[in-house]
Image (cartoon, rainbow, N blue to C red):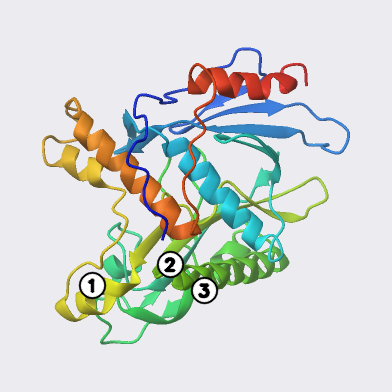
Amino acid sequence: MPAANAALDLTRILPEARIPELPNPYFGKVRDCYDLPASPGFPMGRRILISSDRISAFDRILAAIPWKGQVLTQTARFWFDATADLCPNHVVAYPDPNVVIGRRLTILPVEVVVRGYLAGTTSTSVLTRYKAGARQMYGHSLPDGLRDNQALPQAIITPTSKAFDGGHDEPLTAAEIVDQGLLSAAQWDEVSARALALFARGQKMAAERGLILVDTKYEFGTDDAGRILLADEIHTPDSSRYWIASGYQAALEGGTRPPSFDKDVIRAWVAARCDPYKDPIPEIPAEMIARTAQVYIDAFQAITGQPFVPDTSGETPLARVRANLAPYFDA
């Protein structure tokens, strides 16, 4: 694995990317997006997705982590390139290390989560449900006797409804997806086959790097011709759970959590000091910001096998992003 860069400038951050020359803004928790109008070759238009350095948890922004946006964009780029033969994706161009230009799609109303292990902490995770006594979930039957974090007999898809209106995602089965008209039977067959193929490729490549791809989520959409494309991101530390393979067996036997890229270092620090859903967030110390930045960089290098090469051009990251997106100002 490439050595981490210990001399990174932690003052260069992209807390937001508000660029008034770009049209139709949409600002999410982490990404700042702009929709370009329809043009030749792009009848539904294109979307500019700028990954800021914001880190979100507890439905609020906690801090800005230097280089996080670049790490996530470049990790997704690595995987989009490595899986393009398995599923077409939305990528049109990468004009900047923090930016992807993608085709605008009609996002399918189902979040596709693929799981290879009995893991997770949320109410919709298979481990939480299994420990509560469930053996039938998401249309699958799980055997008795599985241990926490044990490999499942085979990878399964645990889909949920995609709550566009701020509501809560709800667990679904394949039959419910079709019966409720969320997707046609043909669409679900294609989405599930592509998701399992993407996950198998991800697990194989991760294993070659000494990692275990435990679970991940995919987002799919359709273009103007009805083609299903992979959107958003793929196999990043924010969308996926990775364990470090060398420590897995001992953790399984000892009943402890396998070693991982703990992207929740800030989340745990905040939760230990307040009720993050109600109280003001305490100021996060610079040392914690630096540690989290290194976690993301370490994850990029382990996942891709490539050194992290920061782009330090431009007076500020925002100035660089603006300059690289200037050709789209009159789009």
| Residue matched to label 3 | 204
Q: Amino acid at mark 1?
A: Lys
Residue that carries the numbered disc 1 in the rendered image: 131
Identify whether 169 is placed above or below 320: below
- Residue at image position (53%, 42%) is 73
Regarding residue 58, the answer to whether it shows in the image is yes
For numbered disc 1, what is the local secondary structure? helix
In this image, 280 relative to 192: left or right? Answer: left
The Cα atoms of the two marked residues, 3 and 2, are separated by 9 Å
Q: Amino acid at mark 3?
A: Lys
Mark 1: give few (<14), some (14-19) or many (20+) Cα within 10 Å.
Answer: few
Whether 157 is drawn above or below 238: the answer is below
Q: Residues under labels 1 and 3: Cα distance?
A: 29 Å
Identified by mark 2, the residue type is Leu
Whichever of labels 1 and 3 marks the residue nearer the N terminus, that label is: 1
x, y percentage for residue 60? Answer: 32, 32
Residue at the extreme top of the image, as rendered = 20
- Say which residue label 2 marks: 213
- Establish if 5 lies above or below 65: below
Element under disc 3: helix
In the image, taking residue 310 as reference, residue 259 lies left or right, namely left
Q: Residue at x 30, y 58 (%)?
A: 123
